Image (cartoon, helix red, strand yellow):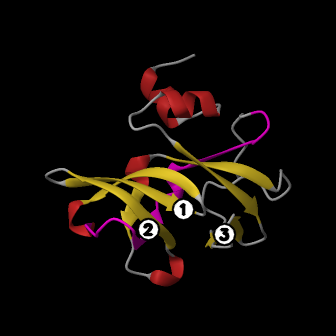
Amino acid sequence: MGAPLDLFERLHNTFVGGFLGSPRMNFIPVNFSNVGFQLADGQAVRVSCTDQTPSRSGPRRALWGVRPEHFSRSFARDSAIISKLDVVQPTQSRLYGSFSIAGQRVAAEIEADAMVGANSNLALEIAISCTAFFDPSSGLALATS
């Protein structure tokens, strides 16, 4: 229990992550490595020890919770996650899209100037410090380092 903003920013489980916010939080399966984590399609996400990732002694698999507003277009291809834009819904200042990342459908809200056509690949960055990790079995948030 707590204030809505506290619940929104300090998630305890996937239920709250999927319930609070619209569009809902995305949950992407990942496997942890010594330098970050890997998506199901092999894309690697390198993270520093200051990022909000679970401790290295914790579980090796997790669900990565990413809110749609924490995506942005990337121009640094070496640190980006490559996604395929399936459906695009432009608004005046933002673009809402349905993307495929590692075979997982996700919703993202990005800058309108990032507009590309449907079925196009788009390099995305994610504000990792704003994301959360959850145990795939219990749905509970994992402790971060």
Query: For the residues carrying marks 1 and 2, which lies nearer the camera in this image?
Result: 1
Q: In the image, which disc is placed on residue 11?
A: none
Q: Nearer the viewer, residue 44 or 4?
A: 44
> In the image, is residue 69 above or below residue 73?
above
* Mark 3: few/some/many CA within 10 Å (<14, 14-19, 20+): few
Residue for badge 1: 101
Question: Per the image, is 135 magenta?
Answer: yes
Amino acid at circle 1: Ile
Q: Are marks 1 and 2 in contact (CB under 8 Å)?
A: yes
Q: Which residues are magenta?
A: 115-138
Q: Nearer the viewer, residue 44 or 91?
A: 91
Q: Are marks 2 and 3 in contact (CB under 8 Å)?
A: no
Amino acid at circle 2: Leu
Q: CA distance from mark 2 to mark 3?
A: 15 Å
Residue for badge 2: 124
Quadrant in which the N terminus appears: top right
Provide the secondary structure element on which disc 1 rests.
strand
Residue for badge 3: 41
Sooner in the amino-acid sequence: mark 2 or mark 3:
3
Tell me which residue sits at (48%, 67%) in the image: 83
Provide the secondary structure element on which disc 3 rests.
loop
Instruction: Name, please, the residue furthest toward the top.
Output: 1
Please count the marks in the image.
3
Task: Residue 113: name its quadrant.
Answer: bottom left
Task: Residue 40: name its quadrant.
Answer: bottom right
Q: State the image coordinates of residue 30 (x, y, percent, origin top left).
A: 70, 58
> In the image, is residue 109 above or below residue 21?
below
